[in-house]
Every structure is written in C-alpha cells, then in structure tokens.
Image: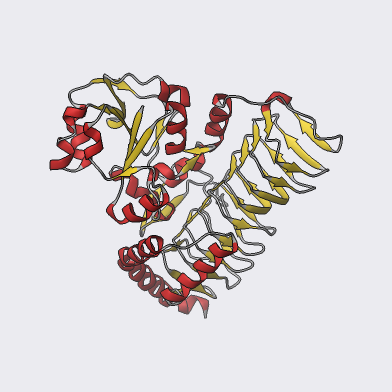
Amino acid sequence: MRVAFFEDRPALEFGPIAQLRPNFDLVCGRHSVRERVVRSTRAVQWGGFVRELLVDAYREQHPEALINETAWLRDAPTLFVNGGWVAAPETVAAIDPATVGLVEGAVAFLTIEPGEAVLFESQTWESAIYQIARTRRRVAAPGRLLTKPWELVEHNAAQITSDFDASTGRQPWTPLGPQVALVGSPDRVVVEHSARIDPFVVLDASRGPISIDAGAQIQSFTRLEGPCHVGLGAQLFRANIRGGTTIGPHCRVGGEVEASILHGYVNKYHDGFVGHSYVCPWVNLGALSTNSDLKNDYSLVRVPLEGKSLETGLVKVGCFIGDHTKTGLGSLFNTGSSIGVMCMILPGGELLPRHVPSFSAVWHGELAEAIPFERSLAGARHALERRNQELTRAQERLLRSVYQATLRERNDAIARFAEQRRRLAPVRA
C-alpha cells in the first residue's frame, strides 16, 4: 500500500510543538500518526503534504519519502490520511478504499485514484482532497481528529493502551530478578531484551500496560506506572513516572512526570515536576524546573497559542514547550503555558509568563528578545553534537524561517507584557 499524510488548516493550531514538524509527526501513545499508519498498513511507499517552510528539512530527515510531490500519485491508488487522525492500528488496516472517513465533517482518510492526481496540480492539496471526497461514500471514521496540543496529552493514556494491545510479537514477561517488583498482570508488561533495569525498580501495570523499548536504562528507585511507554535508548534516573506518560527515544529523565509526552531527546535529568504537558526535542529542563497543571480553584484552563487565549475545556493542563528551549534551575511554569521554539528561560523566583513566543527570553521575570540568533544556533549545534547528531543547513534554514514567521507574535507579546508590568507597577510598589 501507498500512503500520503496531509496537513490541513487545523494543523496550524498545535502551537509551538508543531513549528518544526508536521502534525502527523506529533506523538500520541507510543507512536506518531505517521509511524502508526505506516506500520499498520505495511506501506511500501509513503509521502506527505506539508507547510512549505517544512519541506527542505523534512525531505532531508526522510529521504525515503515523497514530500509535496504530486507526480507519484499518478502511479497507483494512494491512501491519504489526515495528520491529526489518531485511531487504532486495526482501524487503519481495514479502510475501504471506496469510502471517505469523516470526523465532524473533516476528512480523516480518503483513497486517491491515479486519474484524480491532476487535481493536485491545479489547486491546493486540501481543496483537491475535499473535492474528491464529495464523490465518495461517506462513513464515520473511528478514532479522533486532534487539532490542539492538549488533546494529544488528554488522549495519550488511552492511545498507549491501544498501541500496546495492537503490537505483535510481544514476548512473555521474563522476571528480572527478585529485586525488580511487578505489580499487576505480567502480560501487561513488555521489556525488550536489550533494555537494562536495575534492582529496586517498581513496574506497576495494575492500571495500564507498560512497554520499554530496546536500549532503555531504568535506574534503581524508579517507579513506572502504566499506561506508559519508554522509548528507544531512554534513560530514567530515580524517576517517578505516573500513568499516561510517553518517554520518547533517547530522553534522560529524573524527578516526577505525570500524564505527559516527552517527544524525544528531552533532557530532564534532575528533580522537578512535569505534568499534563508536551515537551519537544532538544529541550533542557534545569534542576527543579516545574509546571503547574491544576488551578487552585479547579476551574477550566485556557492556553495562549500565538497570543490568543483558547479554552481547553479541561481542568488539568500543563505546558507545551517547543524545540531547543532551555530553562534555568527552579523555573516555575503556570497552568496552561505555551513556550515557543528556542526560548531561553532564566527564572526570577516567581511564576513565568504563560505565553513565551519562539526565540524569546525570560530574564528574571521580564519577557524580552532572546539572545542573538547566531548564538542560539551555536548552542543548538553544540547540544546536538553531544548526542552525536548534526544541525544541518536545512534545519538551520527552517529555524531562520520560523524566527521570521514568529516575529510579529514575539514583538506583540513583549509589548503586551511591558504594558502589563507598567499597569501593575503602582501595585507592586
């Protein structure tokens, strides 16, 4: 099967966590939408239709894929999947090519025939998809169509369980010695053979499954509570991992994490709390960095995305942190915070601003322009080199493009913050 993933207009509503990646590469459960669909369909070829500024970097990251290319659609039927559609793997495998799957009127999936590919050459891919959709038999698409960052977190626990149940070739639980405690059923725990679990670790699968990928290292006095997933090569140091958490590949995690998604290559080595949050790659959380995920009055949480305060409809919402952001020790994030790409956070002993646009800085409580862009790039390059990775020219161009694209949001937020400080000055005095 051939699969193409597409971003639609709601893909722009994921805020800072999708500024450097298409929405179908965001994680919910054990996998992203792309990974889950490619696995379940056993796709022999896949492609994607993404925002123009992502094209070069994404092509470089996935040379096997066809990105924003229409010619290959003429060769054979291609299953199109909305990047925000999260469903059970068996649902994806059972799609009828004669149908269009809808979630509240939005296209979740649709099979494009070779003769229809010409429409993609004369109009936008979203227009072409919806034009073709009108010719198909409509069915309700199972699963969910996610459009906001907090929805990924909200549904993460259920999706971890779904992904666990759909995984094939699971090996039966092999006792890891009398000093590794298992709570719950052994068939709800999978530990890859090359993972290392030290003595005095607790695996509590009484409320959901636990999966630990190859090369992961779980240090003594760590407690894992399902449903949770620990990705390839991740390292946990005396950590308390609560249910509903995904620890992505090559993360380094200590302290307490609850109902959160650490996408991959996140460094949270020290104590501190992250709850109901999504943290992007190459974020470094300094010692005792902590977020609130519940308001004192238990009211519904609003989140500022691109300067607009949006109602989540949820009582528990943490923070959403974009790639390459660094926080100093003791950083305190308020409930429902949005922190952009490549921000520099130096706390001042009080709650940080809830809206920190990309490439901004917080210096002792004041929102301002970040350190010079070239210096930020040098820091990112050094961080990647420490993990044997490289900041490529395509990635650098993407960061420059996002810097320019977020300029107005950044300037508006800094001006708004300064005005709020000015109005509060007599009260503070």
Q: Is residue 231 above or below residue 303?
A: above
In-front residue for pair 317/373: 373
Q: Is residue 176 left or right of residue 56?
A: right
Q: Quadrant of residue 397?
A: bottom left
Q: Position of residue 343 (x, y in %)?
A: 47, 67
Q: Is residue 414 above or below residue 132?
A: below
Q: Position of residue 409 (x, y in %)?
A: 33, 65
Q: Is residue 362 visible?
A: yes
Q: Residue furthest right?
A: 178
Q: Is residue 205 left or right of residue 262?
A: right
Count of numbered circles in the view:
0
Q: Is residue 367 above or below residue 91?
A: below
Q: Is residue 265 left or right of residue 218?
A: left
Q: Residue at x 69, y 38 (%)?
A: 225
In-front residue for pair 349/380: 380
Q: Position of residue 38 (x, y in %)?
A: 43, 33
Q: Position of residue 100 (x, y in %)?
A: 27, 24
Looking at the figure, which quarter contains the N terminus?
A: top left
Q: Residue at x 32, y 52 (%)?
A: 55
Q: Is residue 185 visible?
A: no
Q: Residue at x 37, y 70 (%)?
A: 416
- Here the colouring is secondary structure
Q: Is residue 152 left or right of residue 257?
A: left
Q: Quadrant of residue 194?
A: top right
